[in-house]
C-alpha cells in the first residue's frame, strides 16, 4: 500500500481500471453462463444484473482501491484553514 502523502500514480489507476473491467466481464460471463445452462431463470438473472451486479462492482472497487493505496483514513487528512487577509477593508465580501 502507498504512503499517506503520495498519490498512487498512473500504474495504480490502470490496474484499478483493468481490475474493475475484469471483474465486470467475469461476473457477466458467470450470469450469462448460468442463464444459458438454465440454472438461472429470466427474472432471477434480471434481478442479479440490476440489483446484485452494481453492489458487486462497489465491493470490487472498494477492495481494489484499498489494495492499490487509494484508501485514506481520517489520520491522513489535514486541517484546512483559510488565511485572513488583514489588508482588506471591512466593507464585506463583495
Image (tube, rainbow, N blue to C red):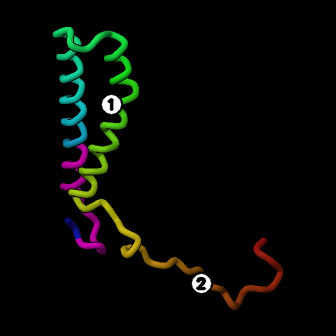
**Tag shown at residue 83:** 2
Residue 45 in the magenta stretch? The answer is: no
Q: Eyeballing the image, is 62 above or below 85?
A: above
11 in the magenta segment = yes
The residue at the far bottom in this view is 86
The image position of residue 91, as x and y in percent, is 83, 80
Position of residue 65 measured from the top left corner of the image (x, y, whole percent): 28, 54
Task: Give the number of the disc on residue 53.
Answer: 1
- Could you tell whether 59 is left or right of 84 in the image? left
Vertical side of 26 occupied by 31: above or below: above
At x 26% / y 57%, what residue is drawn? Answer: 66
Relative image position of residue 11 (x, y in whole percent): 18, 55
* Mark 1 or 2, closer to the camera: 1
| Residue 30 quadrant | top left
> Is residue 28 shown above or below 64?
above
Q: Earlier in the sequence, mark 1 or mark 2?
A: 1
Q: Is residue 27 left or right of residue 47?
A: left
Write down the region rendered in magenta. Answer: 3-17
Residue visible at 24% across and 24% down? 28
Say which quarter of the image contains residue 42: top left
- Give whichever of 47, 83 is nearer the camera: 47
CA separation, marks 1 and 2? 46 Å
Q: Position of residue 18 (x, y in %)?
A: 20, 42
Disc tally is: 2
Given residues 59 and 8, the one toward you in this image is 59
Give me the disc on residue 21: none
Q: In the shown orientation, is residue 69 left or right of residue 77?
A: left
Name the quarter where the C terminus is drawn. bottom right
Amino acid at each position: 500500500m502507498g504512503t499517506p502523502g503520495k498519490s498512487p500514480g498512473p500504474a495504480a489507476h490502470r490496474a484499478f481500471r483493468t481490475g474493475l473491467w475484469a471483474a465486470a466481464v467475469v461476473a457477466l460471463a458467470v450470469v450469462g453462463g448460468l442463464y444459458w445452462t438454465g440454472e438461472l431463470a429470466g427474472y432471477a438473472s434480471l434481478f442479479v444484473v440490476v440489483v446484485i451486479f452494481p453492489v458487486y462492482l462497489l465491493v470490487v472497487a472498494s477492495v481494489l482501491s484499498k489494495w492499490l493505496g487509494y484508501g485514506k483514513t481520517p489520520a491522513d487528512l489535514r486541517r484546512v484553514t483559510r488565511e485572513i487577509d488583514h489588508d482588506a477593508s471591512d466593507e464585506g465580501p463583495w
